Image: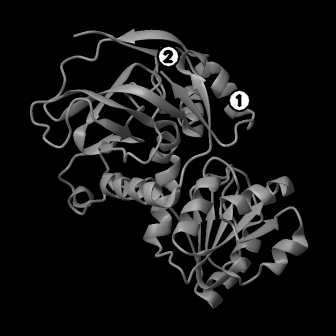
Amino acid sequence: MAKIQGLAAHAAGAELLSYHYEPGKLGLQEVEIAITHCGVCHSDLHLIANDWGVSQYPFIPGHEVVGTVAAVGSEVRSLSVGQRVGLGWQSNSCGQCEWCLKGLENLCPEAEATCVHRNGGYAESVRANARFVVPIPDALDSEHAAPLLCAGITVYNPLRDHGVNPSSRVGVIGIGGLGHIAIQFARAFGAEVTAFSTSADKEEEAKTLGAHNFVNSRESKALKDAASTQDFILSTVNADQDWATYIQALRPTGTLCFVGIPPTPISTPAFPLIMGLRSITGSPIGSPNRIREMLDVAARHGVKALTETFPMAKANDAIEKVKKNKVRYRAVLCN
């Protein structure tokens, strides 16, 4: 079995260096993907630095993979060699628990992440259980599709779970790697979309992406004027905000949903929650079936990640640019 070449961190926070590993025998239900594109996600940066305490070194990051099927295990019937496919955050689940049997494999307690305790997509190829490898629709370019496999499903899943539809008023906090995709999906669902951003210069871009309204969240009056206007607010930012003001921005029965992780615990008065039957929730990635659905919706409605591409060999440059928030809006590595 040929070794797989990739780029690995050999210690917490170290720059990526060339690294080969022996993948072993291909599993009966596994697929090997020859990688053409891999998105650079903020989660990769956290894993390289071991911010979550789960990284093992040497460590190859990457979990927004697009490529072609290079080999299939003997029990795989759903995919064929040469097919263009994608792989996101999750590479396997137990397949037998309550959540897997409900089609909610993303909630499986034994879920395996593509690049946690295994080597990921900053490489020539990667392996995963075939159930988590999804065909890419012809209408999607590979570089624009790659970030959808993590960033895209992260924002699509809660919009679907919370029943966003043409009657909905949806707010998106943050016009970044997640937010710019969330605006497009919410608009595709027919919702009235409001972008909340601390960057006033992003108003024109937010409206080009599909936002009907723009609120400069640095202006306290603008935030207060948004009171009781939103049915669903999706927070995509990894920064602390005045969450009580966003709760006030919800209409009765409205929901504030977190997909970004603020650095400090969320604090808000209980009274507005009680009086307006408002709620606070969070959302992870979606199931493989939901990912397939999302890609189909993206293909039919022209939803795509705005990307900047880098050669795979320049992964360290891409990581530095992402760290400094200088990519609008997703970096993608190309083999």
Q: CA distance from mark 1 to mark 2?
A: 17 Å
Q: Judge whether residue 120 can be spotted in this image.
A: no
Comparing 96 with 186, the one in front is: 186
Query: Foreground residue, 298 or 40?
Result: 298
> Outermost residue, bottom direction?
275
Q: Is residue 3 above or below residue 69?
A: above
- Quadrant in which the N terminus appears: top left
Q: Is residue 185 visible?
A: yes
Indicate the secondary structure of the residue bearing disc 2.
strand
The image quadrant that residue 100 belongs to is bottom left
Q: Residue at x 71, y 82 (%)?
A: 229
Q: Amino acid at mark 2?
A: Leu
Q: Kindly identify which numbered label has been placed on residue 231.
A: none
Q: Which residue bears the numbered disc 2?
A: 7
Q: Amino acid at mark 1?
A: Lys
**At numbered mark 1, what does the secondary structure look like: helix, strand or loop?**
helix
Crowding at label 1, few (<14), some or many (≥20) Cα neighbours within 10 Å?
A: few
Give the left or right position of residue 119, taking residue 310 as reference: left
Color theme of the render: one colour
- Sequence-first disc among 1 and 2: 2
User: Which residue has dot 1 on it?
Assistant: 321
Residue drawn at (56%, 16%), measured in percent from left and top?
16
Give how far across and how far down residue 248 sits, in percent: 73, 79
Q: Is residue 146 above or below residue 223?
A: above
> Residue 204: where, in percent of width, then height?
79, 58
Residue located at (16% from left, 35% from top): 29
Which residue reaches farthest front? 139
Occupied quadrant, residue 195: bottom right
Image location of residue 167, percent across then percent down: 55, 84
Q: How many marks?
A: 2
Residue 98: give x, y in percent of width and height.
22, 61
